[in-house]
Image (spheres, helix red, strand yellow):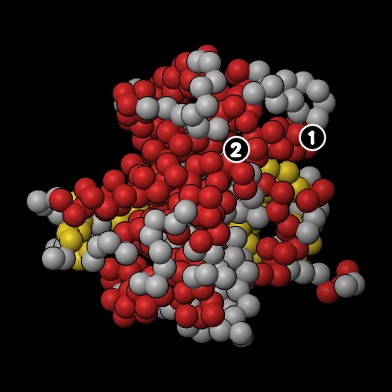
């Protein structure tokens, strides 16, 4: 490509970015409306930070194919609440080395170890739904399930320790993507206090002898590639990140998936044709592959379509360390680039606003999806999340027929991840 074919970056003209930031938090169509006006790459300002939004397979491929030209970045609220030691806030070798250590928690052998515990939690939820005398908020139960998996099955926590951690974690999570002003009474101030309590509780977990529960023994004595052991302060912040990565996105994906099935009975009937021929429960040692694309292609298509239409992470960020060409547009050095996943997943094909899982079984389907981020910083909890989702869908549908309750708000609130506003109230059909 010649220099003459490159274009300068379109801009909204925002200077302080105060109104842009307010619109970003309040308007779920913020990015789409600006893409419609400016094209697949545009620049704006968010509270003084120059930001570039991108969508489309070419733009995303251009960004991810130049990892040496970018580094990880998160908004100030996320940086403060995750902490300076967190993998999310590290770059270069410090990030890569520690990532390899923490990734042991999500290896194939680790997932196999967790499978029996996840199956038990699915069965417990199914029994609770079956015995309930009144409608239950399914989305809230999905949050509890996802948190129990990461806290109990992975970290080995139980009982009151887990429950108190969940309470503070919900406070902390709600402020991750917020304006980072720590005034008394604000959600951000409450989240900072909750973070302190969370780290104290995680320190208590680390102080206990390894008892064979969970997966923390996989980290025992783990060294990064420079031969430096992970300090407790370092490890606490990695576990805090893993709680979020293994909880929020999974709970969102499960809630949105069940919402779509309940709102689209024809799709549920189509899926049940496959589910009814699958065994439940799977043998724990085979659970990681029992419902994969080879054995359950319709389920795989459903998961992909939910991730496309309502990705659990609305976008991910990079910061340019040098000028970078994205979709034939020159993005200057020191610009934060946000990949707008929700807008991108609905871009380029005429019927992408429609929920249609069958598209992923068609040979002409060429969608590139990044529901857990992309490149070398893809979410560590991706494999665990996919396992939980498949086990939950098969476990519930093989045992129950759920019906959504009328007269509730089924629209989605978007931050920090999409969730049905009224909790997705359901009952079991006799």
Residue furthest out toward the left: 133
Along the horizontal axis of the image, is 261 left or right of 379?
left
Image: 183 above or below 77 = above
Residue 74 rendering spot, x and y as whole percentages: 59, 41
Image quarter of residue 427: bottom left
Which residue is at a point 54% across and 64% down the rendered structure image?
292
| Marker disc for residue 226 | none
Residue designated by label 2: 105
The disc, 1 or 2, on the residue closer to the chain's N-terminal end is: 1
Residue 22 rendering spot, x and y as whole percentages: 43, 49
Name the secondary structure under disc 1: helix
Residue designated by label 1: 93
Name the secondary structure under disc 2: helix
Q: CA distance from mark 1 to mark 2?
A: 20 Å
Residue 164 rendering spot, x and y as whole percentages: 33, 25
Q: Is residue 205 visible?
A: yes
Is disc 1 surrounded by few (<14), some (14 to 19) or many (20+) residues within 10 Å? few
Which residue is at a point 63% across and 62% down the rendered structure image?
54
């Amino acid at each position: 490509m010649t220099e003459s074919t490159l274009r300068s970056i379109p801009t909204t003209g925002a200077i302080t970015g105060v109104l842009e930031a307010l619109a970003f938090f309040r308007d779920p169509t913020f990015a789409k409306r600006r893409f419609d006006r400016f094209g697949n790459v545009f620049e704006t300002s968010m509270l003084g930070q120059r930001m570039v939004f991108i969508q489309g397979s070419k733009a995303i491929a251009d960004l991810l194919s130049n990892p040496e030209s970018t580094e990880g970045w998160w908004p100030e609220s996320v940086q403060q609440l995750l902490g300076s030691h967190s993998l999310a806030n590290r770059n270069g070798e410090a990030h890569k080395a520690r990532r390899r250590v923490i990734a042991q928690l999500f290896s194939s052998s680790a997932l196999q170890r967790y499978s029996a515990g996840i199956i038990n939690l699915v069965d417990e939820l199914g029994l609770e739904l079956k015995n309930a005398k009144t409608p239950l908020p399914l989305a809230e139960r999905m949050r509890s399930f996802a948190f129990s998996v990461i806290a109990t099955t992975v970290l080995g926590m139980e009982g009151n320790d887990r429950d108190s951690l969940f309470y503070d974690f919900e406070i902390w999570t709600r402020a991750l993507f917020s304006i980072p002003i720590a005034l008394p009474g604000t959600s951000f101030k409450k989240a900072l206090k909750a973070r302190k309590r969370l780290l104290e509780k995680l320190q208590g977990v680390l102080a206990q002898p390894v008892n064979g529960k969970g997966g923390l023994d996989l980290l025992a004595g783990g060294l990064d590639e420079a031969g430096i052991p992970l300090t407790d302060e370092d490890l606490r912040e990695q576990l805090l990140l893993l709680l979020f990565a293994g909880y929020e996105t999974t709970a969102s994906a499960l809630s949105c998936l069940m919402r779509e099935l309940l709102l689209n009975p024809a799709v549920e009937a189509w899926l049940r044709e496959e589910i009814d021929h699958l065994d439940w429960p799977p043998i724990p040692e085979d659970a990681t592959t029992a419902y994969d694309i080879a054995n359950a292609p319709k389920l795989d298509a459903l998961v992909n379509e939910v991730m496309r239409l309502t990705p659990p992470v609305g976008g991910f960020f990079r910061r340019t360390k040098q000028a970078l060409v994205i979709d034939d547009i020159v993005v200057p050095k020191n610009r934060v680039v946000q990949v707008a996943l929700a807008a991108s997943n609905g871009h380029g094909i005429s019927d992408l606003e429609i929920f249609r899982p069958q598209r992923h079984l068609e040979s002409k389907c060429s969608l590139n999806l990044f529901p857990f981020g992309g490149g070398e910083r893809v979410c560590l909890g991706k494999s665990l999340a996919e396992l939980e989702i498949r086990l939950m869908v098969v476990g519930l549908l093989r045992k129950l027929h759920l019906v959504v309750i009328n007269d509730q708000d089924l629209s989605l609130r978007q931050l920090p991840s999409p969730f049905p506003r009224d909790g997705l109230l359901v009952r079991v059909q006799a």
